[in-house]
């Protein structure tokens, strides 16, 4: 092994492999490893211009005699070797004389270190397991590698972030996570550790992350290199700020994103949608956006309205604008083999290829292929069709659905993109999908850009992405899982997040149990970054199967407006429409801060109260901005709710007006029409007035 400095890098060369250790902005280090003649040039999510720093780099000579070999004839001779360290503000990386890495904060406290268990190396873990801290194993006969990176486990460590997974716990310690996107699953591989650092796996390959009690292990099935970013800070806020500087920050949320969004599966016609908007406004209810969902089009991949159902889109958009309502239109990345765009897109290489079998990726409502969102030409082509058929009719906000993309089945080894094999880069698909629309809208002069997208990866946030949690079930269990999903997505650097209020699948609007769930979820939705109603309400409207030009037409679910669930519930739902309006200035301030500093809009309690150890284990409450503590009711029949109040602040119950000192658990009333909300330190926020 040979270790040397080149510019501001420490390079560890051994055989055909090389490791680069270099500063990457303030208090941050990037580590890359290749086993090829040159380093792969993809920066993936680390695309932003970071602050140039001048780290302190020191090489020194150390004794390396190993006590394992005491008594051996050769061991009596004195041995020395070279080790190095790089100090970049609050983070120090030490490179041992054998090339393994450990990371420390400015106090000299160990943050994390690579996991080595190899007798061939003379280190503190000298055992004959032959397990290395980082491995690039060649895929035989090719130029690609199977990658494993291992780090030590710490009993006291808690891990938060990693994106959106449908499971119970926010703390990912002990979890095994698939590094792949699926409907309702978004892999965003950045986490904040309770030990005072943030870690980003800068690799969009399909793989796994295992946060075990014995070791942490990152795995990619096929890749060109190892690439990760690690940053240290005194608070989670500092860590989040440094990570978002490296991967990009969200723009400012458009004003229409701050209010209420009306949506259902689905409004079939222009007149049906307008009737809902008119009635909403006739009742004096606030609404900022209304969504035209899927299959309003002539065919998948045509990217235009079916004129029989939507005869005057421009007139519709103008009327909605006069009511103060933004029109949002669903776009799918699927292209039907019968679409007018299929032939040209296939000829131009704008479609995702299959390495074997036929080219169909999804057969729902037609034989379809996904367009290749990693291809710059394909991004531009799809935007130009949407510009022609939607934007020029007044529509500037798009719902980019199926963004994982939702393969059927998820055989990642069978798909190939412009950017490479799906195994190596599939997780960047939603980034390219959003980027195409963001850049298209920006070119047209739009200043406020937002796209509702069903998936995200690191860096998606800089393209104005509002993620939602996909086609989830209508149940209290699912509601509970969405809370941790939203908080985990926020800690992974994606601050605009929402869920389908009431869940997507299985909600019968006549069922009292579902009505209770919907009311509780709606109240919670008023305190989410974006307040959006949606769902496939059961049972679907019965219609005979209808075909137009050989294309099957889709029916729709039951009604999903605030007046659809009974008069008593209507009174509660409308109450929260006005709660959200009263909080609009506060939500706007939170969105501005997210854009300026990368601060999540919704975040775990420890984000604002890192010194209160109890806050690190609370998973059923969260902060909405710095001043509102929100505790959704997530079980049927509840009448009260236990809430932990962080120490160091005074808390006022927004409902009862009772004042509590922090650092204690309290039980507060939570009747059906109340979600417990605590206001910090007497801040004047009109929640229940």
Image (tube, rainbow, N blue to C red):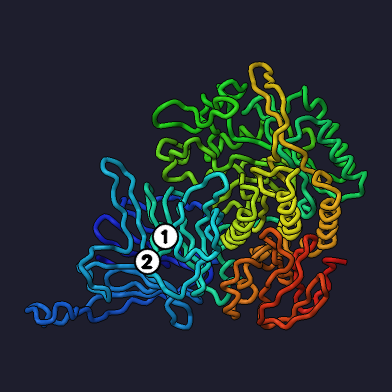
Side of 645 relative to 74 (left or right): right
Which residue, given by chain and number where applicable, does mark 2 sit on?
215
Mark 2 Cα within 10 Å, few/some/many (few <14, many 20+)?
A: some
The percent coordinates of residue 213 (x first, y second) are 39, 68
Residue closer to the observer: 356 or 362? 362
Q: Residues within 10 Å of mark 1 (few under 14, many from 20)?
A: some
> Is residue 346 visible in this depiction of the protein?
yes
Q: Are marks 2 and 1 in contact (CB under 8 Å)?
A: yes
Image quadrant where one finds the C terminus: bottom right
As helix, strand or loop, the secondary structure at mark 1 comes to strand
Residue under circle 1? 210
- Identify the disc placed on residue 149: none
Q: Is residue 530 visible?
A: no
Does 293 appear above or below 543?
below
Q: Image point 70% across, 34% down: which residue?
A: 540
Query: Extreme left residue here?
Result: 73
């Amino acid at each position: 092994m040979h270790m040397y400095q080149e510019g501001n890098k420490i390079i560890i060369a051994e055989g055909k492999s090389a490791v680069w250790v270099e500063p990457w902005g303030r208090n941050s280090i990037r580590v890359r490893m290749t086993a090829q003649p040159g380093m792969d040039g993809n920066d993936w999510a680390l695309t932003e211009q970071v602050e140039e720093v001048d780290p302190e780099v020191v090489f020194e000579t150390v004794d390396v005699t190993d006590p394992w070999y005491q008594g051996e004839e050769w061991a009596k001779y004195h041995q020395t070797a070279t080790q190095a360290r790089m100090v970049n503000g609050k983070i120090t990386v030490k490179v041992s004389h054998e090339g393994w890495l450990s990371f420390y904060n400015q106090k000299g406290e160990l943050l994390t270190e690579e996991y080595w268990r190899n007798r061939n190396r003379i280190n503190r873990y000298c055992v004959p397991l032959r397990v290395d801290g980082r491995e690039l194993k060649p895929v035989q006969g090719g130029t690609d590698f199977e990658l494993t990176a291992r780090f030590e486990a710490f009993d006291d460590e808690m891990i938060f972030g990693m994106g959106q997974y449908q499971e119970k716990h926010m703390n990912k310690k002990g979890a095994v996570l698939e590094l792949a996107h699926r409907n309702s699953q978004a892999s965003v591989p950045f986490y904040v550790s309770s030990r005072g650092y943030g870690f980003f796996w800068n690799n969009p390959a399909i793989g796994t992350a295992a946060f075990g009690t014995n070791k942490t292990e990152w795995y990619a099935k096929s890749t060109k290199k190892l690439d990760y970013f690690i940053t240290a800070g005194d608070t989670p806020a500092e860590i989040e700020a440094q990570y978002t500087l490296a991967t990009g920050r969200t723009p400012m949320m458009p004003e229409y994103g701050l209010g209420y969004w009306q949506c259902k599966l689905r409004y079939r016609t222009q007149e049906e949608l307008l009737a809902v908007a008119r009635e909403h406004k006739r009742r004096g209810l606030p609404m900022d956006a209304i969504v035209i969902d899927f299959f309003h089009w002539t065919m998948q991949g045509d990217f235009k309205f079916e004129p029989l159902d939507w005869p005057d889109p421009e007139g519709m958009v103008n009327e909605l604008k006069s009511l103060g309502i933004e029109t949002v239109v669903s776009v799918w990345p699927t292209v039907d083999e019968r679409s007018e765009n299929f032939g040209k897109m296939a000829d131009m290489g704008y479609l995702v290829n299959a390495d074997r079998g036929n080219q169909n990726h999804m057969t729902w409502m037609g034989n379809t292929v996904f367009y290749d969102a990693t291809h710059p030409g394909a991004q531009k082509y799809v935007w130009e069709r949407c510009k022609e058929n939607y934007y020029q009719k007044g529509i500037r906000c798009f719902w980019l659905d199926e963004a994982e993309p939702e393969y059927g089945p998820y055989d990642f080894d069978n798909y190939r993109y412009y950017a490479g094999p799906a195994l190596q880069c599939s997780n960047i698909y939603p980034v390219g999908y959003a980027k195409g629309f963001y850049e298209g809208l920006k070119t047209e002069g739009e200043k406020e850009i937002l796209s509702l997208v069903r998936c995200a990866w690191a860096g998606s946030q800089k393209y104005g992405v509002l993620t939602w949690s996909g086609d989830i079930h209508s149940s209290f269990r699912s509601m509970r899982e969405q809370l941790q999903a939203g908080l985990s997505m926020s800690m992974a650097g994606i601050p605009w997040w929402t869920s389908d209020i009431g869940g997507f699948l299985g909600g019968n609007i006549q069922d009292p149990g579902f009505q209770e769930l919907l009311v509780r979820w709606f109240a919670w939705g008023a305190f989410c970054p974006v307040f959006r109603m949606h769902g496939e309400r059961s049972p679907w409207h019965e219609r005979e199967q209808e075909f137009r030009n050989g294309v099957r037409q889709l029916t729709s679910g039951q009604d999903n407006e605030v007046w659809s669930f009974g008069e008593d519930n209507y009174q509660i739902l409308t109450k929260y429409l006005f709660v959200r309006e009263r909080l609009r200035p506060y939500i706007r301030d939170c969105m501005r801060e997210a854009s300026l500093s990368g601060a999540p809009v919704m975040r775990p309690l420890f984000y604002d109260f890192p010194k209160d150890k109890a806050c690190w284990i609370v998973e059923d409450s969260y902060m909405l901005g710095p001043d509102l503590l929100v505790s959704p009711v997530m079980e049927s029949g509840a009448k009260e709710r236990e809430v932990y109040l962080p120490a160091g602040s005074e808390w006022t119950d927004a409902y009862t007006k009772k004042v509590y000192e922090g650092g204690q658990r309290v039980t507060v009333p939570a009747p059906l029409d109340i979600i417990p909300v605590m206001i910090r330190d007497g801040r004047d926020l009109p929640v229940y007035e």
